[in-house]
Image (cartoon, rainbow, N blue to C red):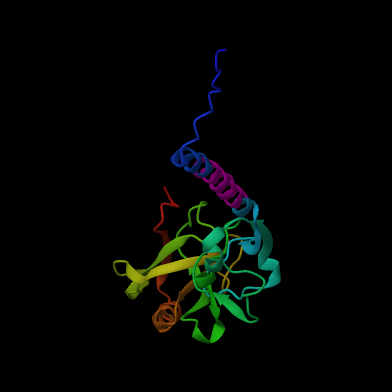
Amino acid sequence: MNDTVSARPRPRAFWADLRFLLGIALIVVSVVGVWFVVAAARQTAPVFAAASTIVPGQSVEADDLRVVEVALGQVQESYASPATLRPGSVATRTVPAGELVPRDAVGDASRARTTTIVLHSASDVPASVTTGSAVEVWAAAPRDRGAFDTPRILVGAATVASVDRDRTMMGSGGTAVEIVIARADVAAALAAVADGSNLSIVPTDGAGS
């Protein structure tokens, strides 16, 4: 009689089971990571966008802003939102219409270092100069018999708040331009107006090209 010896299966190596488990763990981690990335991308928060161009020194009111839901992730705190805007805030720099409002573009009115004045340009103001345009103010002081000195820069950095090409000032024609200037420049600008200097608004941001 032949003895039949049953062949027993060889036990599976421990390292093979461990490799299998590690593979499963890597797949799970990968899936969870992708889920977190997608979830973060879909998470939005309310922040402010400029409803119209905001200029430095302008009082920022509800009508100047609109709330938009955007996914900003870690930079969310860098933008103004309904939770951060304080009553009586003013703009510290220009924010073009439609752009998100950086948090540092809005500050306390008591710290504002700019103000607005209206100047009357003796020369034509380019049609492309509008609210938010960066400009210089040039002045030519009056001399005898209706002559004027060589023009010089009176205000080297100003921002246009509004332009009224139909408005007259003290009975004269031309263009009335409301500009935002540093408080330190106010005295010189008002002195130039008082002595009858010819003032010109010159764009510095390519608006006139």
**Considering only vertical position in the picture, is 37 above or below 144?**
above
Q: In the figure, is residue 134 to the left or right of 81?
A: left
Q: Position of residue 122 (x, y in %)?
A: 46, 64
Q: Quadrant of residue 85?
A: bottom right
At 64% from the left and 51% from the top, the residue drawn is 42
Q: Quadrant of residue 140?
A: bottom left
Q: Nearer the viewer, residue 33 or 182?
A: 33
Residue 90 pos. (x, y %): 57, 77
Q: Which residues are magenta?
A: 22-38
Q: Residue at x 52, y 52 (%)?
A: 127
Magenta stretch mostly in which secondary structure?
A: helix
Judge whether 204 appears above or below 6 on screen: below
Name the quadrant of the N terminus. Answer: top right
Q: Residue at x 45, y 52 (%)?
A: 207
Say whether residue 191 is visible: yes
Relative to 80, is 11 on the left or the right?
left
Question: Residue 148, how many percent across, how many down?
Answer: 33, 69
Farthest residue, direction left: 150
